[in-house]
Image: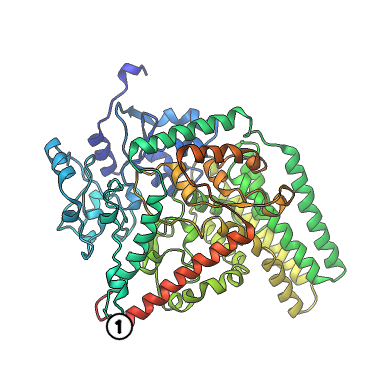
Amino acid sequence: MGSDSVKVFSRDQIIDLIADGKAIVIYKNYVLNVTSWIPKHPGGDKAVYHLVGKDATDEMNAYHCDETILSIPNWKIGKIDFYWENLLPPIQGGIYTKGSSTSKKDKKQGATESLENKLDYNSSLSSSDVDLSTSSSPLSSSNTSLNDIPESNKGIGYPKVNAVKPVVPQNTLVTEENKHILFPVTEEFIDKKSTIINPKDLMKNYDNGLTQQDIQHLPSLDYKTQQHLRDKYAELHETVIKNGFYQCEYSAYVREIIKISSLFLYSFSFLKLEYYFLSALFMGMAWHQMTFIAHDAGHVSITHNYQFDNLFGMVIADWFGGLSLGWWKRNHNVHHLITNDPSHDPDIQHLPFFAVSVRLFDNLYSTYYDRFLWFDKAAQILLPFQNYMYYPILCFGRFNLYFLSWSHLIKGEGPRHGKAAWFRYFELAGLSFFFFWFFYLVVYKSVNGGWNRFNYILVSHVATMMVHVQITLSHFAMSTSDLGVSESFPSRQIRTTMDVDCPEWFDFFHGGLQFQAIHHLFPRLPRHNFRRVQPFVIKFCEEVGLSYSIYGFGEGNELVIGKLGDIAKQCSILLDATKKYEGDLY
């Protein structure tokens, strides 16, 4: 197709396509319609839904190999000849209607009308019902509630129930000037102990204060500034490529396999000698180290060959670890794209045991799990003590992963078409094999006595607790703010992720994944090269004004416990205020 025959789309035409249920994504200046690709997408459907209406150039370049990038033009239906300002994806509450193009006069009026007159924080309406945009055409009516939205206005990926309320009104640009209106913090009523206050207002006040702090310490969220960050990030990515950091050091994986095989050998040797505690301990240590290889394979960062890396990863994760690589990929890809958002990131959705944001006290709807995260009686009892229960609960994290793995495969939540369709059946066989060899051959047939068997299962699984600490450590203490659709990919990743400092000789313990900020910027980068890339990332952050967070392991744990303690305190305040409040909270 010649360049002269490529259709040029206007913004309103793209909005019409999204309103019509098409998955429209912007890549460079291409307009992509990936609707038919979603059932085949190896990374899961949810990941694509979070990119609808957005310029996903940085995300797509970061997550896909050269072969996939070369295939992107296959989905091109046209191009744009103007700078693209992101739309709120339907899965995040974006609502659009066909044919409602905004005239220049209306846009000018929308730009000059005060935010105070458009926002009503005491209203029961979602913020998505208020149109503050000057560049798009969402469905907006001050008389429209979430339950009144017609099906025709719910684009692809829109949640099954009308319950998603974006913190930042649809397609609104967060600025230094309007942050006090979008995120108001009221000091007066906090000091009046005798005043009966809506408990929800207390929580919103606390959350808005954290968001204002984030805005204060970040580069401006306007598109010009964020484009500068994106340009610098693209330069950094080119530097990473030119320095050969994407080239995997295969000898490192030979060492990994030898290390894991040795741990299994110790485990089975002690099992033979009936030293059950040591056998279980080494079994758990082997699973701990296997997690890192499965992680690399899931990101296709070993050979960069999709089929080989996934096959290798499934053998490691499913057949010898009992966990579904497919479940992890679907979960993890969303986590990478919308990191630390309480409504969308499954990696911080752990009610009733943990909450890292007071927004989780509001019966939030999870777009990943397609269900409400109820702030129920169990959560109200457990959350005030979450900082004390952090380590004990993580000891049992692996049992939850078994449930999530089986649930994912039985429900068929992974791709059912395309090159990843066969993974489901291979994984079902793998999990079945694992439960046979571990629970039957090892625990039941080789361990004598019911109490010894119980202890063996417990010790082997508790031994993997440290990997759960490492994973949560990178995000639990970091920002959970929603700063709108203008925030760039590199800004969000650095804002929501912490690195852990340790001596190089101790990298094996963390598996190299203590460099989570670097990993989030370059998900396909072999983890053995993270330390080499770190100086480049630090320089990048200094140049663009982003704060690169890195702490020692002990200090990082203190920050996480402190964050959990702060949220636990807010939970107690909420519960106490609720007893005094006579209004309707939910």
Task: Say whether residue 407 is visible.
Answer: yes
What amino acid type is highlighted by mark number 1?
Answer: Lys
Q: How many marks?
A: 1
Q: In which quarter of the image is residue 55?
A: top left
Q: Nearer the viewer, residue 299 or 342?
A: 342
Direction left: furthest residue = 105
Q: Where is residue 23 in the image (x, y as percent from the top left)?
A: 35, 41
Q: Where is residue 341 in the image (x, y as percent from the top left)?
A: 42, 55
Task: Please name the residue shown 36% across and 28% down the image.
Answer: 29
Of the 4 image quadrants, the one containing the C terminus is bottom left
Q: Which of 433 and 457 is in front in this view?
A: 457
Is residue 571 shown left or right of residue 386?
Answer: left
Q: Is residue 564 above or below residue 151?
A: below
Is residue 35 shown left or right of residue 14?
Answer: right
Q: Alpha-carbon neighbours of circle 1 within 10 Å: few (<14), some, or many (≥20)?
A: few
Is residue 581 shown left or right of residue 482?
Answer: left
Q: Where is residue 279 in the image (x, y as percent from the top left)?
A: 79, 66
Of the 4 image quadrants, the one containing the N terminus is top left
Task: Please name the residue shown 32% across and 22% down the image.
Answer: 6
Q: Which of 1 and 201 is in front in this view?
A: 201
Q: Is residue 479 above or below residue 35?
A: below
Q: Position of residue 90 (x, y in %)?
A: 32, 49
Task: Say whether residue 468 is visible.
Answer: no
Circle 1 sits on which residue?
580
Direction right: furthest residue = 273
Task: Please name the residue shown 55% across and 53% down the image.
Answer: 328
Callout 1 secondary element: helix
Q: Nearer the viewer, residue 156 or 115?
A: 115
